[in-house]
Amino acid sequence: MNIKRIGIDLAKQVPELCDILVSTDDQAIYEISVTAGALVPWLRPVELATDYSSSVDVVLHALNWYESTKSRVQAVLLLQPTSPFRSLESIREGIRLFHEKGGLPVVGVSKVHQHPEWMLSETNGYISPWMNAHGLGVRSQDLLNLYIPNGSFYLVSVEDLRNTNSFYQNLNVPLVSRSMLEGMDLDTEEDFRFAESLVQNLNLK
């Protein structure tokens, strides 16, 4: 398994997707993506390849090109390459939820394990509950379920994306990762090397 093309190989197994478009400014990623069978019509413009570029702007750039060149689409599914361990089952579940919930955005999330209601703040050498309505002394199973986006899955209608310039709306449907591995978000070179070792040592498929 080549971790650099996992997302493309997975997306190719989803019949609901009309095309798999990769947006990149990197020639090596361009070549890997083309070899994997993705649509890579251009290298991403410089102004969309900075540390300050947003995912929404990148997706809208790709969407505008696709609809002006190919055809109109109903929704956009963003599978960020920094979440290589999402499962095919989760992608299918996210698409099912999107249709079941009337086209509301579906966002990949992980359950929060370090609950903010248990957090403490320090002042002058003393610690106290960080929240006034804290949950100290409350069992974990009795705390409010909280989630954090993990970057593994964003599915939003084209209309909502263009109207709000966001993957999030007032109401969003959670796609909860099935495991810590699936919710892993690779942000550093160390994260990437760790992910490569997992692929090699666990024989992940």
Image (cartoon, grey):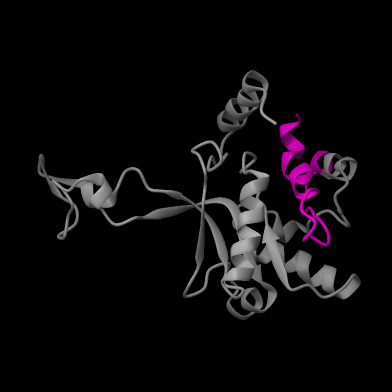
Q: Residue at x 77, y 45 (%)?
A: 8
In magenta, the rendered stretch is 1-29
- Which is nearer the eye, 27 or 192? 192
Q: On the picture, is 138 further left or further right than 202?
A: left
**Residue 72, how many percent across, how many down?**
82, 75
Outermost residue toward the top in this view: 201
Q: On the picture, is 108 further left or further right than 141?
A: right
The answer to whether residue 54 is visible is: no
Residue 78, quarter of picture: bottom right
**Residue 88, how many percent across, how many down?**
68, 46
Q: State the quadrant of the N terminus.
A: top right
Q: Residue at x 56, y 51 (%)?
A: 151
**Residue 14 within the magenta-colored segment of the rendering:** yes
Q: Residue at x 83, y 53 (%)?
A: 43
**Residue 27, how many percent across, how many down?**
83, 42
**Residue 49, how many percent across, how many down?**
70, 54
